[in-house]
Image (tube, rainbow, N blue to C red):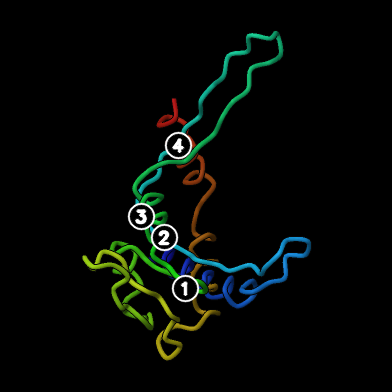
């Protein structure tokens, strides 16, 4: 739930600060369309083989359902809009303003803002800081080793 709250707050801040930003030499202005998904990701390392005698290179990528959800949500978002997958929406619907379906099946929802009568941005930031502070070095090491095992 906290990750979705953070994504909601972050999307609002990104829209506020970057929408219609003058990008300089390019013709036009920056327009954001944000998609949010949730779930487990796989971090994949592909080890390369060098045929030229130079040292082999590694490629890194992340894959999984959350990326598919976020990609589809971003495609459904209009300029200056954020769209959540239905799985992500379940975690923010109690404090979000919006919720109109973004697609015909209702699998994606438009996010407009956080209901500040229920949650404020400083509260979301404080909850995130508390969550990060509760992770012990041993828990972080376990998480890292779990990620490495899945990658090998």
* Label 2 Cα crowd, 10 Å radius (few <14 / some 14-19 / many 20+): few
Quadrant in the picture for the C terminus: top left
Relative depth, front residue between 72 and 116: 72
Residue farthest to the left, as pictured: 105
User: Can you give x and y, in whole percent of width and height, for residue 151 in the image?
Assistant: 44, 30
Q: Which residue is drawn at 33% across and 62% down?
A: 85
**CA separation, marks 3 and 4?**
21 Å
Dot placed on the residue nearer the N-terminal end, 1 or 2: 2
**Residue highlighted by disc 3:** 69
**Residue highlighted by disc 2:** 75
**CA separation, marks 1 and 4?**
33 Å
Dot placed on the residue nearer the N-terminal end, 2 or 3: 3
**Residue highlighted by disc 1:** 81
Does residue 68 appear to the left or right of 12 in the view shown?
A: left
**Residue highlighted by disc 4:** 147
Numbered disc 1: secondary structure: strand
Please identify, in this view, whether the residue under mark 1 or under mark 4 is nearer the observer.
1
């Amino acid at each position: 739930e906290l990750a979705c709250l953070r994504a909601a707050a972050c999307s609002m801040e990104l829209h506020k600060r970057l929408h219609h930003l003058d990008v300089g030499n390019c013709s036009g202005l920056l327009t954001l369309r944000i998609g949010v998904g949730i779930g487990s990701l796989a971090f994949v390392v592909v080890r390369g083989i060098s045929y030229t005698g130079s040292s082999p290179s590694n490629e890194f990528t992340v894959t999984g359902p959350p990326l598919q959800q976020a990609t589809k949500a971003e495609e459904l978002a209009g300029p200056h809009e954020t769209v959540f997958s239905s799985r992500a929406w379940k975690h923010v619907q109690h404090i979000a303003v919006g919720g109109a379906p973004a697609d015909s099946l209702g699998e994606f929802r438009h996010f407009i803002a956080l209901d500040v009568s229920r949650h404020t941005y400083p509260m979301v930031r404080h909850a995130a800081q508390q969550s990060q502070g509760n992770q012990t070095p041993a828990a972080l090491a376990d998480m890292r080793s779990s990620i490495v095992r899945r990658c090998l």
